[in-house]
């Protein structure tokens, strides 16, 4: 059942148009080639542009009592690490995180089993770039 949540969230992520404003105030859409998934090498990236890494961390799953046969409640967290090349400023990170959160903030899966509970962000630590980690907690109820 957890794979249904992961598949749904992955599909939703790839429909997310992540964008930021450049120094001229023009909107730049992040290319799919600048979007990495968990454990994917960053060797193919254009190091002069922002890039992101998408990770889903399924958490605990427990059987719900008195709700019918084999109903399970699962929780997890999804992360988007945003990397901005040093010297580019922090505005692009803010824009990308806001696009990400707006895309997922009120999300509920088509089968209504999965929903996003909350969003969060924090600054990370990376020597080659400015990094922000955007995240959201989700819950699903599946039989």
Image: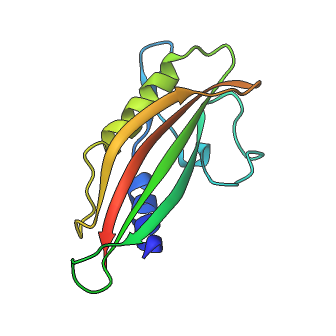
Depth check, front residue: 13 or 24:
13
> In the depicted view, which residue is nearer to us: 41 or 67?
67
76 to 132, vertically: above or below: below
The answer to whether 40 appears left or right of 108 in the picture is right
Residue beneath the point at 38% across and 56% down: 12
Q: Which of the image's four quarters has the C terminus?
A: bottom left
Q: How is the image coloured?
A: rainbow
In the rendered image, the residue lying farthest to the front is 65
Relative image position of residue 50 (x, y in whole percent): 60, 31
Where 35 falls versus 47 (above or below)? below
* Image vertical order of residue 109 relative to residue 54, above or below: below
Viewer-proximal residue, 85 or 5?
5
Residue 63 in view here: yes
Q: Residue at x 22, y 65 (%)?
A: 112
Q: Quadrant of residue 19?
A: top left
Residue 22 shows in this picture: no
Relative to 91, does residue 17 appear above or below in the rendering?
below
Q: Quick check: 126 left or right of 53?
A: right
Residue 102 % position (x, y) = 31, 37
- In the rendered image, the quadrant that contains the N terminus is bottom left
- Image coords of residue 17 (percent x, y): 40, 43
**Residue at 50% over, 23% down:** 92
Residue 141, image quadrant: bottom left
- Residue 82: x, y in percent? 57, 34
Residue drawn 22% across the image and 83% down it = 68
Q: Is residue 101 left or right of residue 54?
A: left
């Amino acid at each position: 059942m957890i794979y249904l949540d992961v598949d749904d969230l992955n599909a939703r992520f790839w429909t997310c148009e992540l964008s930021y404003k450049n120094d001229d105030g023009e909107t730049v859409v992040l290319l799919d080639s600048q979007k990495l998934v968990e454990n994917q090498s960053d060797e193919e990236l254009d190091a002069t542009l922002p890039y992101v890494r998408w990770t889903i961390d399924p958490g605990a799953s427990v059987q719900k009592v008195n709700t019918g046969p084999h109903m399970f409640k699962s929780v997890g967290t999804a992360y988007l690490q945003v990397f901005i090349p040093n010297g580019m400023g922090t505005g692009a990170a803010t824009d990308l995180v806001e696009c990400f959160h707006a895309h997922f903030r009120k999300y509920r899966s088509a089968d209504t089993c999965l929903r996003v509970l909350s969003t969060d962000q924090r600054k990370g630590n990376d020597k080659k770039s400015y990094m922000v980690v955007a995240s959201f907690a989700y819950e699903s109820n599946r039989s």
